[in-house]
Image (cartoon, coloured by chain):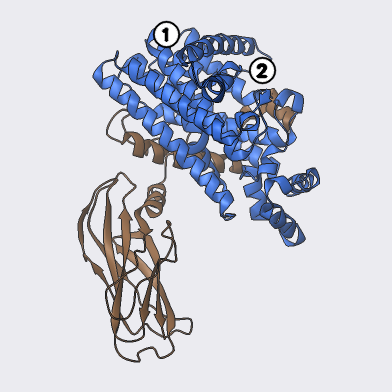
Chain colours: A brown, B blue
Amino acid sequence: VADDLASGSWLVGAEMTALQRRGLDAATRIVERLVATTDGTGDGRAGGDAAAPWPGALALPSTVEVVGLWRDLVQALPTGRGDGPAGGGDSGTGGTAGAAARLVVGSRAGAVTTRVWLHNGTVRRHVDVRLRCDELRDHAGASFPGTVRFAPDVLPELAPSASRPVDVTATVAGVRAVAGGGLFRGTIQVAGIPEAWLPIEVVVRA
Amino acid sequence: VTTTDEPGTLHVEQVLAEVGDMVRRAMLDQLPDGEPHSWLYALMREYPARPGKALRPSLCLATCRAFGGSTAAALPVAVAIELLHNAFLIHDDIVDGSATRRRGPTLPAAHGPELALNAGDALLVVGQRLLRQHTGTLSPAVAARVCDEFDTMALRTLEGQAIELGWRRDGVVDVGPDDYLDLIMHKTCWYTTIHPLRVGALLGAGTGVDLRPMVRFGFMLGAAFQIRDDVLNLVGDVDRYGKELGGDLREGKRTLMLIHLLGEVRGSDRRTLDRYLAMAPAERTPEVIAEVLALMDRYGSIDFAMEYGQGLARTAGPAFDAAFSAASSGPDMDFIRSLVPYMLGRAS
């Protein structure tokens, strides 16, 4: 290995192997994302960033941009702002990218709110951004006895590099709805952007 | 493609040595002196006085000239880059607990981390002062872009440093080769290759130049160089490599080889690896390091890293052609073109 590196023989070769191509494709995805965020796409070389950046390079497949969007668009930042009689939120998930939005609510009727940030790390402008939450269920399949709502329910615009908060409120429906407490999990998704999603869990304390 | 046996090698080393001397003198000229000499100003001079590779200022100067600029236009910026680089080295040596740097003791090892940190901060201030003074002589548009480039470079580097330190502190193991490339893009490539190329082109050609191909070329060159450097840290010749072999393993650095191994290893080997990762660097004895190195060999991690990086290395040449398509041919372009095989094909 050291001899190959010292002689420079690793710089030459016939066709690229699958692994070499894999490394190059990964590097291309990363570099094009950085190029877009640093310099944008409006100047310079014609054809935009989807064009092959050098001879022999693969043009970026459309999914690459989408993967970048998935990474950058949704970030949970639990704030623990409980606003109902049932108790406060829980910031225990730490608020890192990819974390779950986590809410802790008491078993009596009440609501708790946390905040989710949408970060548009792409160069695309999104309009009418709307979040939705699928049905929350516990490990045995029981449904969350309440509702999850978003405020605002629609973001008119999310410009490139923009960040906007959306408050997520979980409300327990009624007294003794969950007698023993429970942990209910589901997924927040963004309508029209199927690759952007975030786990959500609601803890109902007994 | 040239190899190290061709005359270009000597040419590259000669240019690097000449620029290194020029930049070293200019750096030392920038450093103030007085009191407290033995606690600050003497420390600030230690790393700049030791010969380094001068890769960054050489790239900046040659790129500026290749795009029509002069040495005078780029030299203060190249010196500022090198001053910031020296400051980053001090901070790195504190964080990593390193013992030697450029064939001498590190600043924290010789003077303690507190004074070393202070001296590193002072080098940053001097570098920024030089940059501010010089950009005052440029057109406002170019000056603003150059300052933006420095801000971007510093932030990218700090982001990369944070990611790597976070991985280590939190024992993060669920990372893949893509994460590694993303890490070195931020931590290493931006300030080692991309930034000097971009500011050099700006200074030479003005704000109309397309800087995006510089990112592509700089990343392919810098990332392939880093992967090669990581491999040589494990299997190189210590006399030619010039650093402690296995030092990355001792630090628990998430190299491409370690990331590959983490994804492949099973059973008792997995437990061995987990124990190693849970150790503090000081607990990682030569025997433990040898054991992990043997695992990397057995699971093909070194071969994986070599081949994965090879795709980048082989693309650096075409990426250079694209980045410098608008530049003037001549010795500066020849130098940068020769840097590709020099950086990617030599053992030191």
Disc 2 and disc 1 in contact, CB within 8 angstroms? no
Residue drawn at (52%, 33%) of the image: B117
Q: Which mark is residue A197?
A: none
Q: Position of residue B215 (x, y in %)?
A: 43, 30
Taking B83 as reference, is B7 left or right? right
Asked if one can make out residue B49 in the rendered structure from this viewpoint, the answer is: yes
Residue B304 visible at all? no
Q: Which sits in the foreground, B7 or A93?
A: A93
Q: Residues within 10 Å of mark 2 (few under 14, many from 20)?
A: many
Residue at position x 53%, y 20% in the image: B37
As drawn, the residue found furthest toward the left would be: A156
Q: Amino acid at mark 1?
A: Thr
Q: Is residue B331 above or below residue B115?
A: above
Q: Which residue is mark 1?
A: B71
Comparing labels 2 and 1, the label whose residue is closer to the camera: 1
Please give left or right for residue B24 compared with residue A104 in the image: right
Asked if residue B329 is positioned above or below residue A104 in the image, the reply reads above
Quadrant where the N terminus of chain B sits is top right
Q: Residues within 10 Å of mark 1 (few under 14, many from 20)?
A: some
Q: Amino acid at mark 2?
A: Thr
Instruction: Please report whichever mark, 2 or 1, sits nearer to the chain's N-terminal start.
Output: 2
- Taking the spot 32% from the left edge, 58% from the top edge, the residue there is A117
Residue A104 horizontal/vertical position (percent): 38, 75
Q: Position of residue B149 (x, y in %)?
A: 37, 28
Task: Give how far across and how far down residue B164 sits, in percent.
Answer: 54, 45
| Chain name for mark 1 | B
Camera-side residue: A78 or A150? A78
Q: In this image, A134 relative to B14: left or right?
A: left
Residue A184 or residue B321, whichever sits in front: A184
Q: Which residue is mark 2?
A: B4
Most extreme residue toward the right is B287
Residue A148 figure quarter: bottom left
